[in-house]
Amino acid sequence: MSGTSPGLTPPADAKQPARHADAPAPGELLGAHYDQCFGCGGDQPHGLHLAARAGEGVSITAEFTVRPEHQGAPGLAHGGVLATALDETLGSLNWLLRTIAVTGRLETDFVRPVPVGTTLHLAAEVTAVAGRKIYSTATGRIGAPDGPVAVRADALFIEVKVDHFIDHGREEEIRAAMEDPDQIRRARAFEVNP
Ligand SMILES: CCCCCCCC/C=C\CCCCCCCC(=O)SCCNC(=O)CCNC(=O)[C@H](O)C(C)(C)COP(=O)(O)OP(=O)(O)OC[C@H]1O[C@@H](n2cnc3c(N)ncnc32)[C@H](O)[C@@H]1OP(=O)(O)O
């Protein structure tokens, strides 16, 4: 069962996405955008530790191995964790546009249960851009890049300024991030005009 709500249908004047000239080369690992991120951060013990790699055009591949701390039912990944893996992979696409963006809408199909121990192979691409709106789609397959489809998502990300995080984030984490030169460098890597 699949289908996309009107909020995920690009308007008639939407444009094809353009890979930024300074985007990481195809095959390059992107690294975490924030070391405490539940999706990709290396310092988040129960996180997904999702590793994303730049693809051709505005596309990404990523891998995530389901651990016991990610269970919903016995021996199976929690659906919200799988949605997180899709969200994180889709969010990584914005490195290739050099745009900071947050998820506005995420529609997910859960097609097959995903056992603990499975490596989920994710692939995502931006399909259209309209002003601040970035439309994208992702698939997660079991065990191999051509394995059976377990999850799918369509998403709308909305471009924001770095002030979005500074204005809304809890002060102690924002202060720590602003004092971390690596974090500032990573934030700038998302921006066209740092
Ligand atoms: C020095 C400090 C260092 C910090 C450094 C940080 C660097 C980090 C780098 C990268 C971080 C990336 C992190 C990725 C993590 C994975 C992805 C996530 O999980 S993100 C978290 C979950 N998402 C949210 O928390 C969004 C919460 N929502 C909002 O904040 C607002 O609603 C926001 C920004 C999304 C939109 O608000 P508006 O006021 O800016 O804009 P409006 O006018 O409402 O929307 C713009 C257009 O988008 C449509 N739109 C908005 N939401 C929509 C929706 N849900 N469905 C359909 N259309 C929607 C609207 O209809 C409008 O369209 P029309 O321009 O009129 O055509």
Image (tube, helix red, strand yellow):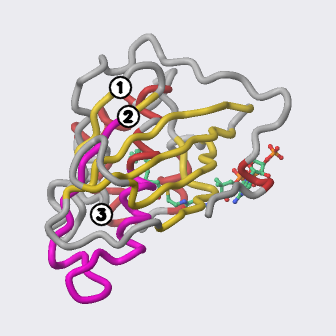
Taking the image as shown, residue 133 lies to the left or right of residue 171, namely right
Taking the image as shown, residue 134 lies to the left or right of residue 20, namely right
- Residue type at numbered disc 3: Phe
In percent of width and height, residue 85 lies at: 36, 58
Image quadrant assignment for residue 132 = top right
Q: Cβ–Cβ below 8 Å for labels 1 and 2?
A: yes
- Residue type at numbered disc 2: Ile
Residue occupied by mark 1: 55
Residue occupied by mark 2: 60
Residue depicted at 23% across the width and 25% down the height: 28
Q: CA distance from mark 1 to mark 3?
A: 23 Å
In percent of width and height, residue 104 lies at: 63, 56
User: Does label 1 or label 3 sit earlier along the sequence?
Assistant: 3
Outermost residue to the right: 12
- Residue type at numbered disc 1: Gly
Which residues, given as a range, are shown in magenta? Answer: 60-88
Image quadrant assignment for residue 78 = bottom left
Residue occupied by mark 3: 38
Outermost residue to the top: 21
